[in-house]
Image: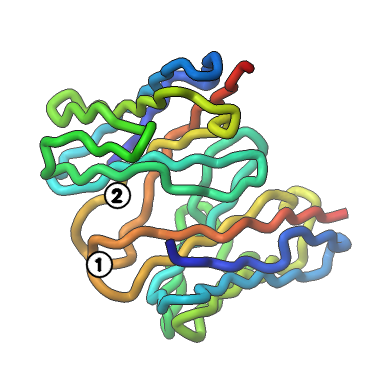
Amino acid sequence: AQTVTQSQPEMSVQEAETVTLSCTYDTSESDYYLFWYKQPPSRQMILVIRQEAYKQQNATENRFSVNFQKAAKSFSLKISDSQLGDAAMYFCAYRIDYGGATNKLIFGTGTLLAVQP
Amino acid sequence: GAVVSQHPSRVICKSGTSVKIECRSLDFQATTMFWYRQFPKQSLMLMATSNEGSKATYEQGVEKDKFLINHASLTLSTLTVTSAHPEDSSFYICSARFAQGLNTEAFFGQGTRLTVV
């Protein structure tokens, strides 16, 4: 069975600094997607970044980038130039890449990120 | 991104009554919708996967007679909590995926906070 592990329940970063959130996963599949979602206090889930497992190049979205290590089954999120609005719960998630639209997301337990002014 | 609207955002009901939560995809057709439950400071727990026009698939441990899911159209799925009890109080979130293709995102509703008194 696939599992997603986030070993950092809470993290803190100073405004304008860089922080890295860790995520590891376990799967026997070769084709899958990995995601980072942000859940601010409003509780709305927001997709931050997505990585296809077949791509070697790490995904980037503005200040957000990932370090995808397929062999190590590691998928960390780096937030550069942290802003107060980045404060939220961050969830790492996994989804297999076949079988149609019913494929479900498997979430990690989340990392609560605080941004200090 | 696509918009998923969930209604109501908050609801308070008396113990023993039923409450219905709606999840609508506003600008796309979703063959598949997912229902999650989230306890405070915890991850999202998948309750069931609903496909338009067919019965929902429930995760292990989720009572299908208590959490009734209907997905009658490509834009609407409903979750009815029947004979609600205080322990059903939680945050419920839906998400929906595009009908076409594998390489598609799941978009989330804003969630419903259910309080059973």
Q: Which residue is mark 2?
A: A95
Q: In terms of depth relative to the viewer, which is nearer, A29 or B95?
A: B95
Amino acid beneath label 1: Gly
Which residue type does callout 2 highlight? Answer: Arg
Q: Position of residue A65 (x, y in %)?
A: 31, 31
Q: Residue at x 68, y 58 (%)?
A: B112
State how far apart marks 1 and 2 are (Cα). 11 Å
Residue B42 tag number: none
Quarter of the figure with residue A102: bottom left
Is A45 rendered above or below residue A20? below
On-image quarter of the N terminus of chain B: bottom left
Residue A82 left/right relative to B90: left
Q: Looking at the picture, does residue B78 appear above or below residue B89?
A: below
Give SS at disc 1.
loop
Counting from the top left corner in percent of width and height, residue A93 is at 37, 41
The quarter in which the C terminus of chain B is drawn is bottom right
| Observer-nearest of B46 and B73 | B73
A112 to the left or right of A108: right
Query: Tag 1, which chain?
Result: A
Residue picked out by circle 1: A100
**In this figure, which colouring scheme has been used for the structure?**
rainbow
Q: Residue at 69% of width from left, 66% of height from top?
A: B81
How many neighbours does mark 1 have within 10 angstroms: few (below 14), some (14-19), or many (20 or more)? Answer: some
For the residue pair A33 and B46, the one nearer the viewer reads as A33
Query: Which comes before the other along the chain, label 1 or label 2?
Result: 2
The residue located at (54%, 27%) in the rendering is A83
Please give left or right for residue A23 compared with residue A70 in the image. Answer: right
Residue B49: x and y, percent?
44, 65
